[in-house]
Amino acid sequence: KEFKREETEYSIMVENDVNKIKINAQLDDSCAKVTGIGEVEVKEGINKLEIKVTAENGSTRIYTLNVTVKELNPIEVTINKKKYTIIRKEGELEPPENYEKSSIKIGEEEVLCYINKNTKNIIIGLTDEKGVSKFYSYNKETKEYTLYNGYNIGGMKINILEMPEELIPKGYIKVSFNYNNNKLDGYQYIKKNQTYAADDKIKGSDFYLIYGINENTGEKTLYVYDKLEGTIQRFNSDLV
């Protein structure tokens, strides 16, 4: 992956027989200093390495390199024609709030998982072919995986789910919006020839309709997210 000055986190995957990597850095400013380079030992699983650059004026910037060393006998799953490896070691991904450590049988092996006691949602860590690791919700009945979209929005922990068609109010259109550098899908009531402050590229309101489950209460419903205020509340269908 090409290096970009403003992009501070990178992920790579290496074969199982790799136990050391060499990190090189070329500075634009000869007066700046860098630490974290050179030969570094890595072990099976995810290795989080930090490269710290200190400018002449004392300001610093930390670049994170996530090096995933492939497992010797990995458990692979396929999602939308893409291959992923199940993370079996604790500590490689930090579980979300309200999730407790457990295990579940995948194929013939017991693997690490986490379960929310309120929603009964099961999440399993998966690593893609580029070395990027994320949690995925696992359905025991269908054996299907879906990307876990748990976010703390306006003080509420919401796991955002795919909106069922029958719940989409008339006149609402699916759009994307950014939340804490994450691209999320929501719905807006679009009015023609009207622009708003939230997004220059979207003609719609500053309010986004999302469908999700409150991971503190287990309630599954429609929510309205106010991007300008950063608040969220249940959607009142009586007002539609």
Image (cartoon, rainbow, N blue to C red):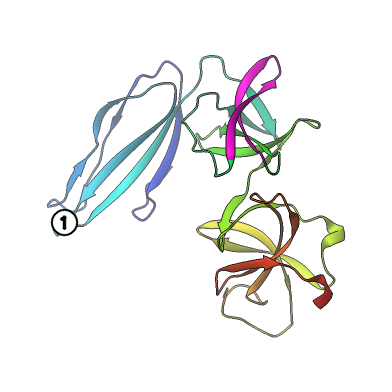
Residue at disc 1, secondary structure: loop
Q: Is residue 94 left or right of residue 165?
A: left
Q: What residue type is labelled 1?
A: Gly
Residue 240 visible: no
Residue 92 horizontal/vertical position (percent): 47, 31
Q: In this view, does 188 lie above or below 13?
A: below
Q: In this view, does 181 lie above or below 11?
A: below
Q: In which quarter of the image is the N terminus?
A: top left
Q: In this view, does 190 lie above or below 58?
A: below
| Residue at far bottom of view | 193
Q: Which image quadrant is residue 212 in?
A: bottom right
Q: Quadrant of the C terminus?
A: bottom right
Residue 132 horizontal/vertical position (percent): 51, 38
Q: Which image quadrant is residue 169 in?
A: bottom right
Q: Residues within 10 Å of mark 1 (few under 14, many from 20)?
A: few
- Bounds of the magenta segment: 99-117
* Point 36% across, 24% down: residue: 42
Residue 108 horizontal/vertical position (percent): 69, 14
Residue 188 horizontal/vertical position (percent): 72, 71
167 vs 152, nearest the viewer: 152
Residue 28 visible: yes
Q: Which image quadrant is residue 191 in?
A: bottom right
Task: Count all numbered tags in the image, as a single digit.
Answer: 1
* Point 63% across, 44% down: residue: 148
Q: Does the magenta-highlighted stretch encompass residue 122?
A: no
Q: Is residue 177 left or right of residue 51?
A: right
Q: Mark 1 points at which residue?
A: 58
112 vs 2, nearest the viewer: 112
Q: In this view, does 85 lie above or below 147?
A: above
Q: Is residue 53 left or right of residue 216?
A: left
Query: What secondary structure prevails in the magenta region?
Result: strand
